[in-house]
Image (cartoon, rainbow, N blue to C red):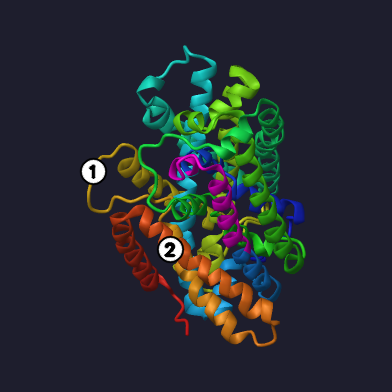
Amino acid sequence: MENKLERRYGLFTAICMVVGIVIGSGVFFKAQTILTRTGGNMPLGILAWIIGGAIMLVCLLTFSFMGQKYERVNGLVDYAEATVGPKYGYYMGWFSATIYFPGMTSALAWLSARYTLEFLTSAFPNFPMTVPASQGGCVIGPECMSLTLFYLCMTYGINALSPKLAGKMQTSTTVIKLVPLCLMAVVGLIYGLSSGTLQQNFVTTAEVADVAANPLFSAVCSTAFAYEGWIIATSINAEIKDSKKNLPKALILGGIIIVAVYIFYYIGVAGGATNQELIDKGATVAFTNIFGGVLGNILNLFIAISCLGTCNGLMLGCCRCMYSLAARNEGPAPKVYSQVDEATNMPTNSAVFALLVTAAWFLYFYASNLACMWTGPFVFDSTELPIITIYMMYLPMLIQWMRKEKDQPMLRRFVLPGLALAGSLFMMLASVLSHGMGVFWYMIVFVVVMFIGGLLNRKKTA
């Protein structure tokens, strides 16, 4: 049995991977958060989206250059190994397999379940719930937990049994989630201009109890998390047809689509409701004002599909993490995790490991963030804080790229990587300012997990 993955994904699927992972639930609600932090200042909010998008794009461009030069099994691990060294590449892969992918995948499965139930309870007020929706049943009730576990198993099963089906699911959910975003961008703009709401929102502010001390900086912090996740597309590097050409194209085109959709959706929402309404009630009020109560409620269904598509993309990358290490003869039991199933052409053992670790992170997320079973030590947001370490781990890669790649032109070697370096530092600072002591508790867990990974590495890397 040959332990190599088939190149099955084309450019369109790779673009959908980038767009589908980044555009999740956050885009539907960041309009409210950004308006609140800027005191209802619409132009300042648009500027925040532009700055956050610019940071993402310079990082995308820099890593697309690495994608053109380095290619093996898993893009991010390949880049870390080639720029800094094999040992660093191993720790990047171990971090992706045990913290970064599983933490976000578990949260997206829960969000998919939550908004599925919110749609059902809104469409059918008598829908039976053990804990009524008005008392948080859609968030922490047993139905939500059961549906979360089902979605985890479903996305795992789709990816483990039929990788091609997983790719088609990623493509279809990406197209579906873009429907309400593009619809609001176009119809909201027309509705807002004809009613005068959009013009009013651009020249008036709103009453907000706690406007951020530095509104622009705080608003950009909010966009930082909405733009996160694009790097995960590099995990299917070995399965993209002509990946040296198609992966960079997917990263760049996907990034441009994301930034454009975010900005135009934000403007469209502003055309459907006043700044005050958006701050008080969220983006749903804009959909309801424009499309009516029934269609407005369908927004929850689109959010559920959006989250499920993101969850599938995360699981798609998550299932391949241990394989990417084992293919290098690194990590625990390389012979076990490097096996590829003959029938499905999928690293099944690597996928099982992904499901178990993801379930463990969901258990932590539920106990600490949702049910609040304890407070104080080791309570942190397992969905956002890994961003600190992923951008921290980018830093030596970017520095080494600028130091070693002497054959690259000035723009590729210094200008864009330098901007990506500054953007990575900003993301780290934004995370620290947003989460406070949670960062300290998370970093302890991060260090312990990395130490365990070092002990389990069977290959002594240089």
Name the front one of labels 2 and 1. Answer: 2
Above or below, 431 against 297 in this view is: below
Figure disc tally:
2
Q: Residue at x 73, y 55 (%)?
A: 9
The quarter holding residue 24 reads: top right
- Residue at numbered disc 2: 428
* Crowd tier of the residue under label 1, counting other residues whose Cα lies within 10 Å: few below 14, some 14–19, many 20 or above: few
- Which of these two is toward me, 199 or 151? 199
Q: Residue at x 64, y 51 (%)?
A: 259
- Residue at numbered disc 1: 374
Magenta residues span 34-57
The numbered mark, 2 or 1, whose residue comes first in the sequence reads 1
Residue 238 visible: yes
Residue 204: percent from left, percent from top: 53, 36
Q: Residue at x 45, y 71 (%)?
A: 91
Q: State left or right for residue 74 relative to residue 41.
A: right
CB under 8 Å between discs 2 and 1: no
Asked whether 339 falls inside the magenta stretch, the response is no
Asked whether 39 falls inside the magenta stretch, the response is yes
Residue 98 visible: no
Q: Amino acid at mark 1?
A: Trp
The quarter holding residue 265 reads: top right
Classify the position of the N terminus by image quarter: bottom right
Q: State left or right for residue 440 relative to residue 410.
A: left
Residue 361: percent from left, percent from top: 39, 49
Q: Amino acid at mark 2?
A: Met
